[in-house]
Amino acid sequence: MQAIRVRQFGDPEVLTLEEVPDLTPGDGEVLVEVKAAGVNPVDTYVRGGSYAIKPPLPYTPGIDGAGIVRQVGADVTNVKPGDRVYVAHGTGGSTGTYAQQMICGAAAVHALPEPISFAQGAGIGVPYATAWRALVLKAQMLAGDTLLVHGASGSVGLAAVQIARAAGLTVIGTAGTERGRALVRAQGAHHALDHTAPDYRDEIRRLTASHGPDVILEMLANVNLNHDLTLIAPRGRIVIVGNRANIEITPRLVMSKESIVTGLTLWNTPDAEARRIHAALGAGLASGALSPVVREELPLADAPTAHRRVMEPGAAGKIVLVP
């Protein structure tokens, strides 16, 4: 089979397409024929060698994917050969999704509802699990709350917009391009603002009658966090899901509003919590309330291009590799 291999950490060019042996699942494992692999920013951090997790070299990248179950090992009861599935962070994942085949633990595969394409399925794992965990478990969002999503046109941001809108929140999303803002509105946001405009925070205050958002989902804390502390409503919740540098904040702003600032790393999700998350996501996908947005599909050999594009500004949905 063909797979992308990384033999040294570095720039996107270290991603090379190679012929590798076919895979065989062991006990408790599932062999998936990969139809689409999702590209996430974390894939680029790992490839560059800057992430806390460094897999042994050589390795095949990719956390998210979708495809068809071809074989199952002993003791696997949740899926069978022929099932359409998506692959997400879970127990026992052993090979990457940037390949024609992958092996993972049974807990990492989930039924892919028929309305959802394989390309869309490759955009579920990291984006939707992150958004659901941030909004439901960390921020404890409530119907009637107002949510601000920074960078709402990215895959996590769009997932958050869909989840929050379905739960009865008023949603304000930001994006840096008109295309991105149109997409954010199309996915259910009540308001879409240009975060490159100098007065967009004043617009947030106006839209919330100076009360501020009850929940802020923060994708770039090193730029926005101190501003978030001035915007957040009294006893509001800020959840950090993305950060690229240090920032100086004013703790008194947290104290005066008794706000909560928290963060998450998806890899810290306990197994029991992951099961609940994907049960909820499966229901939303089947009902049509959740529907991943695919920005573009690229051949597997174009993995270097995908890694460059996923880090460019102006996100508008998910980038997917097709073996």
Image (tube, helix red, strand yellow):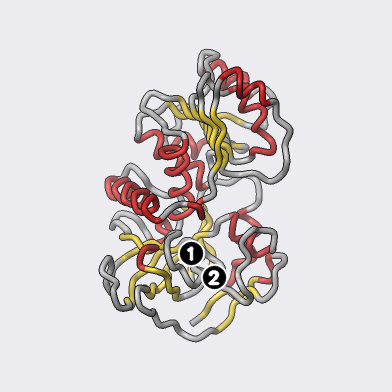
Q: Where is 163 relative to 310, above or below? A: above
Q: Residue furthest top?
A: 209
Nearer to me, 253 or 88: 253
Task: Quickly name the residue at label 1.
Answer: 37
Confirm or deny contact between disc 2 and disc 1 (CB under 8 A).
Answer: yes
Residue drawn at 48 percent across, 24 percent down: 214
Say which label, 2 or 1, has the lower sequence index: 1
Q: Amino acid at mark 1?
A: Ala
Q: Where is 54 relative to 74, above or below? A: above
Task: Quickly name the residue at label 2.
Answer: 300
Task: Provide residue 227's location: percent of width, then percent of height.
Answer: 66, 27
Task: Provide residue 215's location: percent of width, then percent of height.
Answer: 49, 29
Q: Which class describes the residues within 10 Å of circle 1: few (<14), some (14-19), or many (20+)?
A: many
Task: Provide residue 166's location: percent of width, then percent of height.
Answer: 35, 35
Nearer to me, 29 or 224: 29
Residue drawn at 45 percent across, 65 percent down: 36
